[in-house]
Image (cartoon, rainbow, N blue to C red):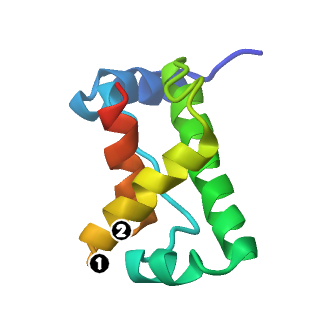
Amino acid sequence: MKLRPLTTLVLILAMASPGAAYATYTVKGSVECPDVVKEDANEDFRKMNMWWILGYFSGRNYERDEQTGKGIDSEDLYAHVLSFCRANPGKDMDDASIDLYDLLQ
């Protein structure tokens, strides 16, 4: 497949830009911390939130080619997020997951 000169130039400029060294991502489906705490009493919501956290870790690990969190029980990961949310009601689950992921680095 041949690239057109303009397409090639755009790709080169995009890779050379200062922001190209940093990956950005958008978090979808995050739950506000007060709701995480409230939903902890419901087993179905609790499991969905735990799976969301595991999915967050999978995505970050794929992006970075790492295995952060490997060998740690998913219940323990969730317990940290729940504790974070209890202490930070103005935050949300992705803030708690970022905190945990960075803590495990």
Q: Are marks 1 and 2 in contact (CB under 8 Å)?
A: yes
Q: How far across and down, in percent of the image, does residue 60 sit?
A: 51, 35
Residue 58, by quadrant, is: top right
Residue at image position (56%, 31%) is: 72
Residue sitting nearer the eye, 100 or 42: 42
Tag count in the figure? 2
Disc 1, SS: loop
Residue 74, image x and y in percent? 62, 43
Where residue 75 appears, as percent x and y from the top left, is: 60, 48
Q: Position of residue 8 (x, y in %)?
A: 51, 21
Q: Which residue is mark 1?
A: 89
Q: Nearer the viewer, residue 45 or 65?
A: 45
Q: How busy is the neighbourhood of tag 2: few (under 14 within 10 Å), some, or many (20 plus)?
A: many
How far separated are the C-alphas under marks 1 and 2? 6 Å
Image quadrant holding the N terminus, namely top right
Above or below, 2 against 4 in this view is above
Circle 2 — which element? Answer: helix
Name the residue: 48% across, 23% down.
64
Task: Please name the amino acid that badge 1 sits on.
Answer: Pro
The amino acid on which the numbered mark 2 sits, given as a three-letter code, is Cys
Relative height, residue 47 to residue 100 (above, below): below
Please name the residue that numbered disc 2 is placed on.
Answer: 85
* Quarter of image, res 49: bottom right
* Closer-to-camera residue (85/27): 85
- Residue at 32% from the left image edge and 35% from the top image edge: 102
Q: Residue furthest left?
A: 18
